[in-house]
Amino acid sequence: MASKKNNNFTLGLLLLFALAAGGAWWLMKEDEVSGDRTAGILEGMQFATPVANVHKIFIAQRDGSTVTLTRNDDHWMVNDQFRANANIMKNMMTTLGRVSVKFTPSRAGNEHIIKEMASIGIKVELYGKSDNLIKTYYVGGSTNDELGTYMMMEGSDQPYVMHLPSLEGGLRWRFTPKAENWRDKTLIRAKPDDIKSVSVNYPTRKSEAFKLAVNGKDNFEVVPGNELVTPKGGKVNTNAVHSYLVGFESVIAEGFENVNQGKDSIRLTTPFSILEIEKQSGEKKVVKFFPIDKE
């Protein structure tokens, strides 16, 4: 009798041990799956990027519009052709470095958001100094209140509503794929000490043309731009020349007219004025000014 009880007791322990072992395995498996899922969720939320690590930004949209922004020492370039607007790039760096999750959309809304993302989403690729891909994500539309922007990491199926803390408004416009929106509108950038000469010509009033030569510190020479005009002579007003040269440090245009239908005909007309600036390095900048027909 005692032996039967002992056998029952031993069998019960074995069953208990088996159940305990199975439960432990199930819990560990659940923890493992849960941990993978948690890691995936966390990775899918990491949109913010240390801006010092970003050296190239590629932005593309389904309509074929693309732009590549590349870091070049102390400034950025647009498609390796034009200098990027410093203020716009500053805003971009703030966005890349501080963008954060405002909230996670409801499961019911995910399908609509993802479908819209596939239609209007803007693809953003961030690259490091060695042209290594850091991360890729998609920027969708704004929330109904315009205070958040839908974004989703590549490889994830969970979109998030993103924002910049302490700043109201959507973020989509900051990721425009239009190259002209990134370009620096500075027409002339020349420090006074870098200027060797300035020539101003008026094709329809040649007698008013002149050339300013910089021959050293406070050593200026102003002569007529037309050989038929007799130099006036006299002492050059150095203060006036200094003020004039300072004006060339940053001459910024209001915008671009590259899509102006009349640009070809405008080029065929006689310019009102032609400005040529030569730097001490030998670099020359020529700008032609055309009158605007207000009619």
Image: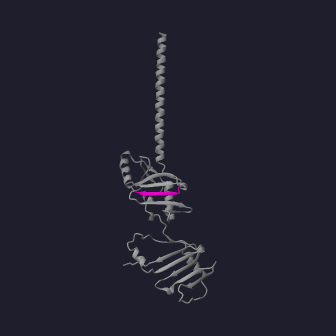
When asked about the image quadrant of residue 236, the answer is bottom right
Answer above or below: position of 235 versus 38: below
Q: Which colour scheme is used?
A: one colour
Position of residue 173 in the picture relative to residue 129 (left or right): left
Quarter the C terminus occupies: bottom left
Question: Residue 272: horizontal and vertical position, in percent?
Answer: 45, 81
Question: Residue 17: horizontal and vertical position, in percent?
Answer: 49, 23
| Front-most of residues 243 and 32 | 32
Answer above or below: position of 70 versus 255: above
Question: Residue 141: horizontal and vertical position, in percent?
Answer: 39, 55
Q: Is residue 57 part of the magenta span, yes or no?
A: yes
**Figure label count:** 0
Per the picture, the main secondary structure of the magenta-coloured stretch is strand
User: Is any atom of residue 167 visible in this view?
Assistant: no
Question: Residue 215: horizontal and vertical position, in percent?
Answer: 62, 79
Q: Is residue 206 part of the magenta span, yes or no?
A: no
Answer above or below: position of 248 versus 221: above
Q: Which residue is drawn at 48% across and 36% down?
A: 32
| Front-most of residues 79 and 12 | 79
User: Is any atom of residue 25 visible in this view?
Assistant: yes
Q: Which residue is drawn at 38% across and 45% down?
A: 107
* Residue span colored magenta: 54-61
Q: Which residue is drawn at 47% across and 43% down?
A: 40
Instruction: Find the residue positioned furthest to the top.
Output: 1
Answer above or below: position of 208 versus 122: below
| Front-most of residues 153 and 107 | 153
